[in-house]
Structure formats: C-alpha cells, structure tokens
Image (spheres, grey):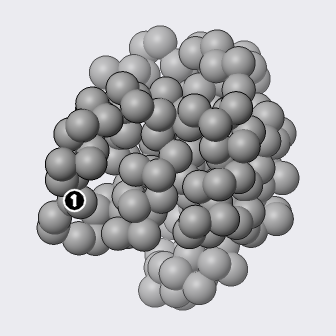
Amino acid sequence: MIGDGAVGLSAVLAARRLGAERIILMGRHKDRTDLGRDFGATDVVGERGEEAVERVRELTGGDGSHSVLECVGTRPAIETALGVVRDGGVISRVGLPQYGDVPMGADAFMRNITLTGGVAPARAYIEELLPDVLEGSIDPGRLFDRTIGLDGVPEGYRAMADREALKVLIRP
C-alpha cells in the first residue's frame, strides 16, 4: 500500500480481511503507520523514492510485490508503484489521480505490468462488510480522528490537508 492516509489504511484493512500474508504499508506519519500495523500491516516502509523501492525489493527477496495499491494519487506515488511491483504484477490506482498521464512506456510493457483502478463501488460491498463492522471484526471508524459541526467543515478540510487530521467526521 503506497500511502498512509484513509485510503491506504482502508486498503490495509481490506487486504487483511482477504487473507494477505504480507502487507507492506508505505508511509511516514507514525500515528498513521501505527494504526496501519493495528489494521494488519506486517511491514512499514518510511523511505521515499529510490530508497523506498530498494527497501520494498529487499523485503520481497528482490522480486517486488505482486499487487500494489497506489493510494495517494500523485505522480511520485505511481512512479514508486512502478518501482515496487514485480514483473507480471498488478498496480491498482485507488487514490484520486492528480495527474493526467502515467509513465507506462516500453519498460512497463516489457515487464508485463497490469495497471487498473478507479472509484470503489462501495455500495456493492455493504451487505458483505456491514456484519463485520457491526460485530467488530473490522473497525474502519478508527480512521476518524476529529469530529466537527457543519460550521467547522472548512477547518476540517484544512486539518486533513495539513496532516493534522486523518479523517474528519461531521456531526450536524
């Protein structure tokens, strides 16, 4: 998982629920990566750029990961994803892209990398996931670390943008 925001941490929950044996969370915010470990991340990589790619390659015996979720939406994040995915692997873009083109040239083609992604069809999973939430086997509510009223919405967005809050819950 590239990114320790709400999307990346939700991806950790999902991977654990689906039985992933190893979950590598890439992020640098200790409070978030600690939550990621609670959610099921087996490894945390705090480096960025080439150091991050080298670290993930080291953790995977030099191969890279067969499944990579790019949960940030920035150009450096997709470049990291291309660096950590193994040949024949899959990258899924689940962070809202902040860029138009993806560097999927001849190198990615020759490595047989699959690129996919899009908006999660959340309603399609409610019947399956809601019982797990209600019985407490997964607790995505831990992502909300600040509660505000309607008049605090601008401040809530600022707090998330400034990494002072992970996810803000609005209570009218």
Seen in the image, is 5 located left or right of residue 106?
right
| Res 45 visible | yes
**Residue at 73% across / 63% down in the picture?**
46
Residue 39 higher or lower than 104, as above or below:
above
Q: Residues within 10 Å of mark 1 (few under 14, many from 20)?
A: few
**Residue at 46% across / 86% down in the picture?**
154
**Residue at 68% across / 80% down in the picture?**
164
Circle 1 — which element?
Answer: loop
Residue 89 higher or lower than 79, as above or below:
above
Seen in the image, is 107 located left or right of residue 50?
left
Looking at numbered disc 1 in the image, what kind of residue is underneath it? Val
Q: Position of residue 137 (x, y in %)?
A: 74, 20
Q: Position of residue 98 (x, y in %)?
A: 28, 71
| Res 147 visible | no
**Residue on which the image places disc 1:** 102
Seen in the image, is 145 located left or right of residue 74?
right
Q: Position of residue 148 (x, y in %)?
A: 61, 73
Residue 118 higher or lower than 16, as above or below:
below
Quadrant assignment for the N terminus: top right
**Residue at 66% across / 65% down in the picture?**
51
How many labels were placed on the picture? 1
Residue 78 higher or lower than 127, as above or below:
below
Q: Position of residue 34 (x, y in %)?
A: 84, 53
